[in-house]
Image (cartoon, coloured by chain):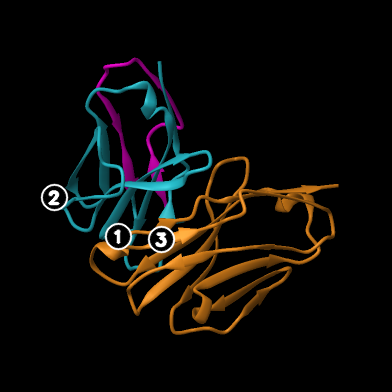
Amino acid sequence: AQKVTQAQTEISVVEKEDVTLDCVYETRDTTYYLFWYKQPPSGELVFLIRRNSFDEQNEISGRYSWNFQKSTSSFNFTITASQVVDSAVYFCALSGASGSARQLTFGSGTQLTVLP
Amino acid sequence: DVKVTQSSRYLVKRTGEKVFLECVQDMDHENMFWYRQDPGLGLRLIYFSYDVKMKEKGDIPEGYSVSREKKERFSLILESASTNQTSMYLCASSRTAYGYTFGSGTRLTVV
């Protein structure tokens, strides 16, 4: 069975602060995929990133960066110099490669509020 | 622009009614999914399908059924709506395990 844990329910920061959202996962698959999604107040899920289990390179995209560590089963997301527009619910998710593992399993989400 | 379309953005139904939530994708994806989103619980999988007429139960199938008669359409059915099924429902489709597209959601209120 797959499981994703986002222990931080809510985080509040002041604009320009850096913030890290934690994600810990469990799976018995050797091939799997990890995702981060953003859900702004409008409600639509916005895809941010996907990593496969064989690629542990960290990734940076503008103010966003992701740290994937298989040894600790973690896939953490950092926003540098946060902005008010970053306020949203962020979900970490996991899927396997085949069969019923193709379903996307989500964490419970982290509500990020960036104050001006 | 590829798309997953959910037929209604907001829906209000009475307790005991039979409710159909429709989802259509135009990407020829094999896999389709129905999720329910509730505050503090994230998105939980209700049912999914990886082929026409195929369906599998997700984590919370009780009180729901699904239908997939055509590849592009995946319907979620609440046989007898109850107030605890008031929620946001999200449909998604994918071709592989690493490319998911979500609809914009249906907010269902059961009164």
Q: Both on one chain, marks 3 and 1? A: no
In the displayed structure image, the side of residue A98 where residue A87 appears, left or right: right
Residue at mark 3: A3
Q: Residue at point 22% right, 52% down? A: B71
How crowded pointer 2 is (Cα within 10 Å; few <14, some 14-19, many 20+) is rated as few
Mark 1 element type: loop
Q: What amino acid is found at the position of numbered circle 3 in the picture?
A: Lys
Residue B84 on the magenta segment: no
Give the color of chain B as drawn.
cyan
Q: What amino acid is found at the position of numbered circle 1 in the picture?
A: His
Viewer can see residue B24: yes
Residue A98, placed above or below residue B93: below
Counting residues from the start of the chain, the first of labels 2 and 1 encountered is 1
Give the color of chain A as drawn.
orange
Give the number of the mark in front: 2 or 1.
2
In the displayed structure image, the side of residue B56 where residue A59 appears, left or right: right
- Mark 2 → mark 3, Cα distance in angstroms: 28 Å
Q: Which residues are magenta?
A: B3-24
Residue B28 in the image, given as x and y percentages of width and height: 29, 59
Q: Nearer the viewer, residue B55 or B63?
A: B63
Q: Chain of mark 2?
A: B
Rendered image: mark on residue B29 = 1
- Mark 3 → mark 1, Cα distance in angstroms: 25 Å
Residue B98, placed above or below residue B5: below
In this rendering, the count of numbered labels is: 3
